[in-house]
Image: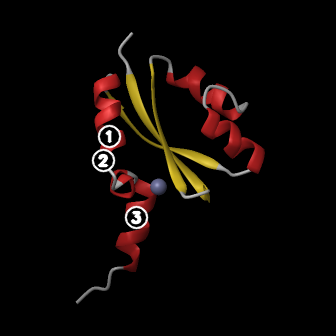
Amino acid sequence: MPRIVYLIHLDRPLAHARHYLGSTDDLERRLHEHEQGNGSKMLAAVARAGIPWRLARTWPGDRAWERRLKRYKKSKRLCPFCSAGAHGRMQKP
Ligand SMILES: [Zn+2]
């Protein structure tokens, strides 16, 4: 199975985190686990805090790609929900 790297956007921040990045070879099953608060310590905390989240984006990729994206600090720029908000605040000339 090809591996998928996925970005989850939290509707409210958890501590300072606004996104969760992970990888899986079965995205549907993984998202279902996350909905139950399983599969990730962070998303378990998100579920306990009652924070809604959305799948923001996916890439075909492996763990090396996942690590590369995790090192990329500007995760907002990767997220269509966040970058849409930033564009909305920009003033037109
Ligand atoms: Zn976002």
Of the residues shown, which amino acid type is indicated by label 2?
Tyr
Tag 2 or tag 3, which sits nearer the N-term?
A: 2
Task: Using the image, tell me which numbered label, if any, was put on residue 51.
Answer: none
Q: Quadrant of residue 15?
A: bottom right
Q: Which residue is mark 1?
A: 69
Q: Is residue 19 left or right of residue 57?
A: right
Q: Residue at x 30, y 47 (%)?
A: 72
Can you give x and y, in whole percent of width and height, for residue 19 in the image?
50, 49
Q: Which residue is mark 2?
A: 72
For the C terminus, which image quadrant? bottom left
Q: Secondary structure at mark 3?
A: helix
79 vs 68, nearest the viewer: 68
Q: Quadrant of residue 44?
A: top right
Of the residues shown, which amino acid type is indicated by label 3?
Ala
| Number of residues whose C-alpha sits closer than 10 Å to that of mark 1, classed few (under 14), some (14–19) or many (20 or more) | some
Can you give x and y, in whole percent of width and height, for residue 68 in the image?
28, 36
Can you give x and y, in whole percent of width and height, for residue 70 in the image?
36, 40
In the image, farthest residue toward the top: 1
Evaluate if marks 1 and 2 touch, with contact meaning CB atoms under 8 Å apart: yes
In the image, farthest residue toward the bottom: 93
Residue 14 vs 2, above or below: the answer is: below
Q: Secondary structure at mark 2?
A: loop
Residue 64 vs 1, above or below: the answer is: below
50 vs 57, nearest the viewer: 50
Q: CA distance from mark 3 to mark 2?
A: 19 Å
Q: Secondary structure at mark 1?
A: helix
Tag 3 or tag 1, which sits nearer the N-term?
A: 1
